[in-house]
Image (spheres, rainbow, N blue to C red):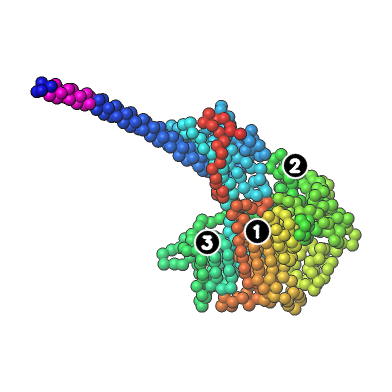
């Protein structure tokens, strides 16, 4: 019995040893598996981390490409003409070459520009400049590459300019040509305004509903500014960024920190460069679709159906060639010169040149017009047609003055230069249904309301070489011809290059509101009203509202500052354009 029990216990001990061995082997296998799993996870993490670095680095390189192109535009405003048309993105563009820029590389053998010295992070970009002449907007597609990873972004770039502001002025004084010829322009923050200059202030009834900038120091009397306000005045300690007359209420700045300092924005000397947009010999070199040129006093009345009625008696050629002008021709889309068309009493009704420019120049005379080569030159003593009357007169009445109805009946012209017989003046009014810019070498007159048929798509620019003037005629006794206190509506981006934007005879009687929807830029501050204690006593109350579309686009062929930068108005990541080997993905 004892022996059997001993054998049984021995048997049990052998069974325990077997179980222990199996347990040890099982635990070892589990530990081995865990170790292998940890190594796999570690290696996977290292791989994922590397891919994450490439993924993030590629988008950073794409952004670097946008910044690189912006810097090249800032250094050379003509850089918009460089690129490669062989990519799908740029196929509708026109370029003069790549300028040996490695970022314009295309295909597997094409180059990439480097972000870092080691060349690990690179980029290439493509440009679409097909809409630049019309809208001022460039499209850029930038692809960044790190390792085997590429990512692409598309950016819209717009030249920063006058239409970034609802209100812009160079000097906060009245134009010396309209006030005092002894005035020597200067900035109040610099040497102070000359004692012969006339300062102009914002009144308490004025509402500026958009961004505003002045290179000068603003003078404000209780005005409401709903947008950001900037000035070229660096505020000294303990000083205000604006001035006010005694008794004026404090201005109401809706945007905190306004007014803020911002660098001076320089204006071009003239708008003559716009004349080049009417040349028909530059179709392959920057002017693929020439605009319309008119000569001498010209009236334009927009119609809501996309047409306009143009009266321009002195016009001979509506397109020109050469610089200086050596030839020209008639463009049927701009009307028919002569008594049966543009020179007729009723003018000619034509379609508004969509996405284009209308430029009005002055009349020039020559002993032998043929010898000058300019088809719009007239022989001294000539007139456009039999019975045409053109005389500088302050007597008023249709048929006198500039020959197209100004001054109007019973109007006394403000000065002998107001309605010059041969001046490059344009008189604009009506309901517009298109996109265009109207520019004049001399004055642009707002001859009536200017509105849009479709405020979402229609767009107008008005550019005066001298001044842009709201027509507000008076009689010989100084009374307004139109005594109604009606509002004047103007939808447009307004720019006066050398002088001012103002209301004619603003001191002759109270009107309603001057409602501007768009933007205003001028060299000198133009008066639109008289005020006392901030209250309007004559002229118009300002009601200016910014056209938000100007943040992203501009009227066709609108002028820009002398020195400017290009800001990004839209930026999105898109489908990748190139593989890491440079193959374009279509």
The extreme right residue here reads: 386
Q: How many marks?
A: 3
The answer to whether residue 15 is magenta is yes
Judged left or right of residue 151, residue 3 is: left
Can you tell which quarter of the image residue 582 is in? Answer: top right
Instruction: Give neighbour class at mark 1: few <14, some 14-19, many 20+ (Cα, 10 Å).
Output: many
Between circles 1 and 2, the one closer to the viewer is 1
| Magenta residue span | 5-21
Q: Can see residue 375?
A: no
Say which label, 1 or 3, has the lower sequence index: 3
Are the two marked residues, 1 and 3, in contact with CB atoms closer than 8 angstroms?
no
Instruction: Give neighbour class at mark 2: few <14, some 14-19, many 20+ (Cα, 10 Å).
Output: some
Between circles 2 and 3, the one closer to the viewer is 3
**Residue 176 position in % (x across, y down):** 63, 65
**Residue 525 position in % (x across, y down):** 60, 65
Q: Which residue is mark 3?
A: 228
Please name the predominant secondary structure of the magenta segment in the image. helix
Question: Which numbered disc covers residue 493?
Answer: 1
- Circle 3: element type: loop
């Amino acid at each position: 019995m004892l022996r059997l029990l001993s054998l049984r216990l021995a048997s049990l001990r052998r069974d325990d040893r077997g179980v222990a061995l199996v347990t040890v082997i099982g635990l070892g296998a589990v530990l081995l598996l865990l170790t292998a799993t940890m190594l796999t996870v570690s290696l996977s993490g290292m791989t994922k981390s590397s891919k994450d670095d490439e993924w993030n680095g590629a988008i950073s390189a794409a952004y670097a490409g946008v910044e690189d192109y912006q810097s090249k535009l800032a250094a050379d405003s003509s850089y918009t003409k460089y690129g490669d048309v062989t990519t799908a993105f740029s196929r509708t563009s026109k370029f003069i070459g790549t300028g040996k820029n490695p970022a314009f590389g295309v295909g597997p053998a094409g180059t990439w520009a480097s972000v870092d010295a080691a060349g690990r992070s690179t980029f290439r970009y493509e440009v679409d400049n097909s809409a630049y002449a019309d809208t001022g907007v460039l499209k850029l597609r930038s692809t960044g590459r790190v390792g085997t990873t590429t990512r692409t972004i598309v950016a819209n770039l717009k030249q920063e300019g006058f239409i970034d502001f609802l209100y812009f002025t160079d000097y906060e004084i009245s134009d010396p040509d309209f006030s005092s010829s002894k005035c020597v322009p200067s900035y109040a923050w610099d040497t102070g305004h000359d004692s012969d200059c006339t300062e102009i202030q914002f009144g308490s009834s004025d509402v500026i509903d958009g961004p505003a900038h002045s290179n000068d120091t603003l003078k404000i009397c209780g005005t409401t500014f709903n947008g950001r306000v900037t000035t070229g005045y660096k505020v000294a300690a303990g000083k205000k960024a604006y001035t006010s007359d005694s008794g004026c209420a404090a201005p109401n700045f809706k945007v905190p920190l306004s007014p803020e300092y911002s660098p001076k924005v320089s204006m071009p000397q003239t708008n003559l460069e716009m004349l080049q947009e009417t040349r028909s010999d530059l179709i392959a070199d920057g002017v693929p679709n020439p605009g319309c040129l008119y000569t001498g006093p010209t009236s334009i009345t927009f119609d809501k159906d996309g047409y306009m009625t143009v009266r321009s008696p002195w016009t001979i050629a509506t397109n020109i060639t050469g610089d200086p002008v050596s030839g020209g021709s008639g463009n049927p889309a701009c009307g028919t010169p002569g008594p049966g068309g543009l020179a007729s009493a009723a003018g000619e009704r034509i379609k508004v040149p969509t996405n284009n420019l209308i430029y009005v120049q002055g009349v020039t005379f020559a002993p032998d017009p043929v010898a000058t080569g300019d088809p719009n030159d007239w022989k001294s003593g000539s007139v456009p047609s039999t019975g045409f009357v053109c005389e500088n007169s302050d007597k008023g009445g249709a048929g006198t003055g500039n020959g197209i109805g100004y001054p109007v009946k019973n109007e006394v012209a403000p000065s002998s230069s107001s309605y010059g017989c041969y001046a490059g003046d344009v008189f604009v009014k009506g309901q517009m249904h298109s996109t265009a810019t109207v520019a004049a070498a001399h004055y642009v007159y707002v001859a009536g309301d200017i509105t849009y048929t479709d405020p979402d798509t229609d767009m107008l620019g008005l550019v005066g070489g001298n001044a842009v003037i709201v027509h507000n005629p008076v009689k010989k006794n100084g009374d307004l011809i139109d005594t109604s206190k009606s509002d004047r509506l103007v939808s447009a981006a307004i720019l006066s290059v050398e002088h001012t934007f103002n209301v004619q005879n603003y001191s002759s009687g109270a009107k309603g509101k001057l409602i501007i929807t768009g933007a205003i830029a001028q060299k000198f501050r133009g008066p639109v009203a008289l005020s006392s204690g901030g209250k309007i006593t004559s002229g118009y109350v300002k009601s200016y509202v910014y056209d938000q579309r100007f943040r992203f686009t501009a009227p066709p062929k609108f002028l820009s500052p002398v020195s400017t930068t290009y800001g990004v108005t839209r930026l999105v990541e898109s489908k990748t354009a190139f593989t890491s080997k440079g193959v374009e993905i279509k």
